[in-house]
């Protein structure tokens, strides 16, 4: 009991919980406002508690100043890890947003109370589908496991490399655009060909008023293609999960 309530153990639990809480605030699917703050706090404590005995040996000096500095460093580390994780999974919603723009669904935006921002139809649908697949497939467990490994690669008395963070963010943004185009690119190409065909038809037969048929045709194509694309999303989510874990481990220096 004395070991569990000793000052080093409690300090390690506090610092580890701070990093976990900061990560949960940024990382999907845990950053959703549908998860209450009390649940996130308990989850952060549950993540940090099993790691506490090993982390107690890597504590900085237990003084007010050193603990305050260490707490700020854990917040920065948790936010950076969460941002890299969210950057990876943002590709799915970005693909849905592109599909909304080229399919004409961007006009039907609505206020999303979970993200506190305006959200388009397929962007929100793909985001919810990504969250559902992460939960159902158990991918969130792999993401959690990857985060817990960062405690070993980046101990509580370690320092986050800003140069490594800059390189990973730059590479993560490039991967975001590539993944977005890989998901939505084929669908956008088909919609572009449909627009081109309608344009040629309107030039060949102006009396048909082909552009009046454009909206229903593009809506039909968008719904059909999006339904077909759903079949490949589980494989995409699996690859994005692996990439998120690699980014977290890379930031931690593993």
Image (cartoon, grey):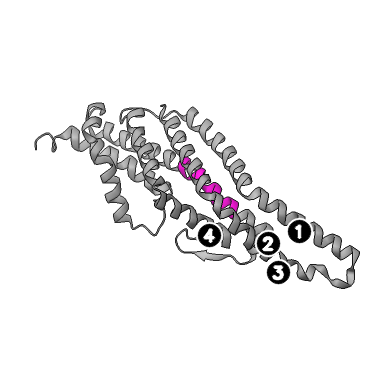
Q: Is residue 206 magenta?
A: no
Q: Secondary structure at mark 3?
A: helix
Residue placed most toward the observer, 67 or 194: 194
Cα separation, mark 2 vs mark 4, equals 17 Å
Sequence-first disc among 4 and 3: 4
Up-down relation of residue 135 to residue 8 (above or below): below
Residue 216: which numbered mark, if any? 3
Residue at disc 2, secondary structure: helix
Could you tell me if the residues under marks 3 and 1 are in contact, i.e. CB atoms within 8 Å? no
The residue range painted magenta reads 84-96
Q: Quadrant of residue 63?
A: top left
Query: Which one is nearer the viewer's eye here, 144 or 48?
Result: 144
The secondary structure type at the circle numbered 4 is helix
- N-terminal of the two: label 2 or label 4? 4
**Distance from Cα at disc 3 to Cα at disc 1:** 12 Å
Q: Which residue is mark 2?
A: 221
Work out whether 202 lies above or below 89.
below
Q: Residue at x 49, y 28 (%)?
A: 163
Q: Which mark is residue 79?
A: none
């Amino acid at each position: 009991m004395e070991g569990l309530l000793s000052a080093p153990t409690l300090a390690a639990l506090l610092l580890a919980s701070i990093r976990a809480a900061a990560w949960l605030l940024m990382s999907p699917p845990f950053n959703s406002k549908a998860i209450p703050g009390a649940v996130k706090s308990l989850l952060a404590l549950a993540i940090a508690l099993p790691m506490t005995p090993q982390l107690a040996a890597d504590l900085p000096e237990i003084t007010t100043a050193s603990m305050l500095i260490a707490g700020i460093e854990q917040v920065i580390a948790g936010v950076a890890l969460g941002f890299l994780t969210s950057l990876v999974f943002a590709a799915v919603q970005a693909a849905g947003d592109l599909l909304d723009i080229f399919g004409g669904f961007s006009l039907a935006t609505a206020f999303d109370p979970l993200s506190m921002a305006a959200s388009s139809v397929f962007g929100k649908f793909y985001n919810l589908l990504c969250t559902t697949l992460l939960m159902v497939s158990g991918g969130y467990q792999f993401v959690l496991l990857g985060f817990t490994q960062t405690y070993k690669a980046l101990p509580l008395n370690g320092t986050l490399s800003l140069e490594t963070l800059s390189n990973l963010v730059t590479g993560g943004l490039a991967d975001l655009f590539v993944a977005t185009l890989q998901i939505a690119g084929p669908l956008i190409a088909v919609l572009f060909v449909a627009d081109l065909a309608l344009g040629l038809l309107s030039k060949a037969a102006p009396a048909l008023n082909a552009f009046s048929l454009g909206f229903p045709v593009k809506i039909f194509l968008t719904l059909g293609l999006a339904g077909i694309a759903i079949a490949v999303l589980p494989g995409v989510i699996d690859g994005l999960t692996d990439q998120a874990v690699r980014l977290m481990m890379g930031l931690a220096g593993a």
